């Protein structure tokens, strides 16, 4: 007799929590707590969970999300969603006034009056902080991330503010009164233009970031809190040394500050040279970041517009991470402007590929959200996996293929890309279509412990 959804998910959640706790114990780590101002070792942005811990976390989050939807009143869920924008704004406010830095590591917390005195803001109460006693607040493992010396600070300020504004124009973009605007897929007809009242695209040689260097620096700093969340898995779950053997360098096309190259350089000292390519406006932020990581000798910045012919010809591993998803796939001409397309970028790489070079695309591959009333338990799947090599487990009974709540950020980024630049994260068929339009074909898709997959691409 099959189990009901709720009972099955309860068993799956218990299974996942047990596996998670077992992995903590195997690493001699305590269980995380929300009742302390101290960060837990697994909170470090560079921490990479073991394959079993990573899968246990995904299954636990997926189970919790579904159980919440089954148990919570649908009207309460709708109300919570309606006012979620205020919670998002509250996090940005807390970061802007430096509240997490003011609270520091004080376990007892500060009173509302003390907080008001230190920040110059009237008495406030924010959910990301813990209340140690009535009227006294302290940091927890969530709020620690938005201290001013943490990468998360830039995510909670600049990126939060950017999408708060863009979100306002998103419904109008999708349901615009002008059919030409509504059905357009170029980067000049988006919620960004509507919200910021501009004709410029967000990205590109003549885009918003290019025209405002300070804005570009702030965007780069905020992305510095996004990249490292996937970089550890990208660095560990792919044979970088093997693929770089005999090559002149790894070239990160559109590499921003150089977070990926610095992560790889740190982990693999045997790889001697990395090149970060991006627009000239990125040079200052990139070279500063590279120097801060002590990698100035092995990681260098190089100006390169990825829509122009690639200047590197020879034995190179070309990488495109979080770049192609910023651009649409299909060609089109709107009001005399040719839409800037991901396939065109790929053609610039294809033109320099040879038997001694290759291309790796690092982006999310969107999975369907379908569920099945059949599937192995997490314990059964973990018994079959290699503890030292990451392989995704099969979703347990009633867990969606995309692992639901655990994959939420991938779908959020998908919507964000649509609103910002009329592009999207791709499913495997869509990725295949884009690669073929670029004159190449997919050799293999490699999963990692993070939101990104590494797709090996070769000439057709």
Image (spheres, helix red, strand yellow):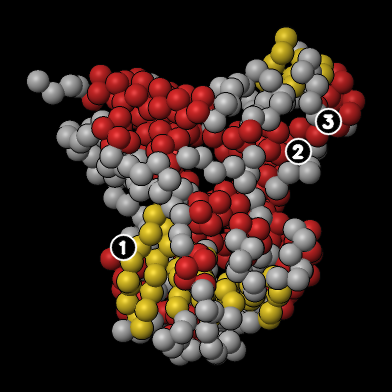
Residue mark closest to the camera, 1 vs 3: 1
Residue at (70%, 48%) from the top-left corner?
151
Where does the image place residue 227, in percent across and percent down from the top left? 59, 55
- 172 shown above or below 371: below
Locate residue 28 relative to residue 444 in the image: left or right. Answer: right
166 vs 431, nearest the viewer:
431
| Quadrant of the image containing the C terminus | bottom left
Identify which residue is drawn at 42% across, 79% down.
343
Q: Residue at x 29, y 50 (%)?
A: 368
Say which label, 2 or 1, has the lower sequence index: 2
Task: Give whichever of 346, 408 is nearer the camera.
Answer: 346
Q: Callout 1 environment at 10 Å: few (<14), some (14 to 19), or many (20+)?
A: some
Mark 1 residue element = helix
Badge 2: residue crowd in 10 Å (few <14, some 14–19, many ≥20): many
Q: Which residue appears farthest toward the left when viewing the image?
A: 1
Q: Which residue is mark 1?
A: 428
Say whether residue 446 is left or right of residue 295: left
- Residue under the point 61% across and 66% down: 270
Where does label 3 land, which residue? Answer: 102
Distance of label 2 from label 1 (alpha carbons): 38 Å
Residue 287: x %, y % from top left: 76, 68
Name the residue beneath numbered marker 2. 147
Q: Quadrant of the N terminus?
A: top left
Q: Earlier in the sequence, mark 2 or mark 3?
A: 3
The image position of residue 419, as x and y in percent, is 50, 59
The answer for how far apart the CA atoms under marks 2 and 3 are is 9 Å
Residue 278 picture location, percent across and down: 64, 75
Q: Secondary structure at mark 2?
A: loop
């Amino acid at each position: 007799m099959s189990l009901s959804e709720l009972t099955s998910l309860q068993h799956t959640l218990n299974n996942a929590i047990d596996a998670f706790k077992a992995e903590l114990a195997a690493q001699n780590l305590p269980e995380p707590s929300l009742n302390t101002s101290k960060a837990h070792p697994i909170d470090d942005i560079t921490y990479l969970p073991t394959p079993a811990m990573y899968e246990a976390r995904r299954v636990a989050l997926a189970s919790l999300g579904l159980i919440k939807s089954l148990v919570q009143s649908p009207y309460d869920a709708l109300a919570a969603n309606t006012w979620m924008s205020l919670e998002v704004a509250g996090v940005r406010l807390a970061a802007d006034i430096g509240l997490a830095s003011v609270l520091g590591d004080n376990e007892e917390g500060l009173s509302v009056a003390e907080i008001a005195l230190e920040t110059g803001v009237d008495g406030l109460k924010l959910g990301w902080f813990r209340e140690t006693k009535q009227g006294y607040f302290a940091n927890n493992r969530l709020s620690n991330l938005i201290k001013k010396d943490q990468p998360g600070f830039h995510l909670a300020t600049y990126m939060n503010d950017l999408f708060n504004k863009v979100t306002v124009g998103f419904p109008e973009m999708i349901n615009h009164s002008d059919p030409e605007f509504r059905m357009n897929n170029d980067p000049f007809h988006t919620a960004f233009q509507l919200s910021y009242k501009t004709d410029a695209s967000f990205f590109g040689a003549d885009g918003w970031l290019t025209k405002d260097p300070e804005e570009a620096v702030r965007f780069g700093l905020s992305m510095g809190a996004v990249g490292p969340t996937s970089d550890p898995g990208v660095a560990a779950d792919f044979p970088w040394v093997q693929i770089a053997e005999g090559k002149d360098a790894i070239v990160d096309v559109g590499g921003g500050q150089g977070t990926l190259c610095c992560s790889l350089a740190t982990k693999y000292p045997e790889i001697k040279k990395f090149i970060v390519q991006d627009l000239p406006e990125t040079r200052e932020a990139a070279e500063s970041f590279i120097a801060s990581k002590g990698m100035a000798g092995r990681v260098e910045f190089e100006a390169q517009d990825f829509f122009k012919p690639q200047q590197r010809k020879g034995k190179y591993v070309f990488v495109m991470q979080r770049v192609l998803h910023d651009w649409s796939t299909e060609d089109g001409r709107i009001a005399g402007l040719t839409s800037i397309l991901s396939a065109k970028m790929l053609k610039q790489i294809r033109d320099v590929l040879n038997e001694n070079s290759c291309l790796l695309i690092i982006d999310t591959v969107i999975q369907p959200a379908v569920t099945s009333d059949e599937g192995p338990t997490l314990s059964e799947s973990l018994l079959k996996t290699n503890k030292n090599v990451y392989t995704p487990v099969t979703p347990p009974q009633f867990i969606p293929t995309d692992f639901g709540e655990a994959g939420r950020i991938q779908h959020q980024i998908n919507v964000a890309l649509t609103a910002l630049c009329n592009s999207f994260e791709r499913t495997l068929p869509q990725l295949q279509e884009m690669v073929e339009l670029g004159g190449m074909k997919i050799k293999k898709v490699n999963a990692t412990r993070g939101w990104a997959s590494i797709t090996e691409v070769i000439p057709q």
